[in-house]
Amino acid sequence: MDTPAAEVLVPFFGLIIPFGAAFGVMYLHYTTRHRERMNMIDKGMDPLIAKPAPDGRRAMRNGLLMVGIGLGLLAGWIIQHALLGSESENPLPFFIGVAICGGASLMAYYQFYGRKHEG
């Protein structure tokens, strides 16, 4: 066994730590929610009251953001191939395109929907 410890341990912990953290966060979320519901039942309250109502505006905002990110990636690809050449490996146009188009989509959401609900 001539492999250094780093070649074995880094991939091992690189898989264990992220999956373990995700499992831990999900476990805490579900156990906390269960305890809250059990306490509500003990006090005679209806646990379905705490269930949030579906919000269509959130879905619209997230959808616009995803479309903006997709358009930003497309714009970054076009900029990279048009200005830098197809063999360039520079990721900067992608980041700039995502930031600009994603921000523009959130500003468009605010213009159309956010002002109506401010009062």
Image (tube, grey):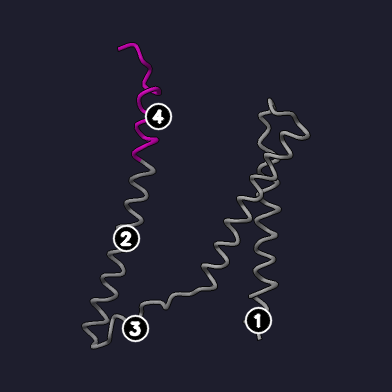
**CA neighbours of label 2 inside 10 A, class few (<14), some (14 to 19), many (20+):** few
To which residue does mark 2 refer? 28
Q: Amino acid at mark 1?
A: Lys
Q: Residue furthest right?
A: 83
- Whether the residues at callouts 4 and 1 have beta carbons within 8 Å, the answer is no
Q: CA distance from mark 3 to mark 4?
A: 46 Å
Q: Residues within 10 Å of mark 4 (few under 14, many from 20)?
A: few
Q: Residues within 10 Å of mark 1 (few under 14, many from 20)?
A: few
Residue ID for mark 3: 49
Q: What's the distance in space between the residues labelled 4 and 1, CA to CA?
A: 51 Å
| Majority secondary structure of magenta residues | helix
Is 11 one of the magenta-colored residues?
Answer: yes
Tag 3: amino acid = Ile
Q: Secondary structure at mark 3?
A: helix
Picture quarter containing residue 81? top right
Question: Magenta segment, which residues?
Answer: 1-16
**Which amino acid, by three-letter code, is at mark 4?**
Val
Q: Residue furthest left?
A: 42
Q: Is residue 110 magenta?
A: no
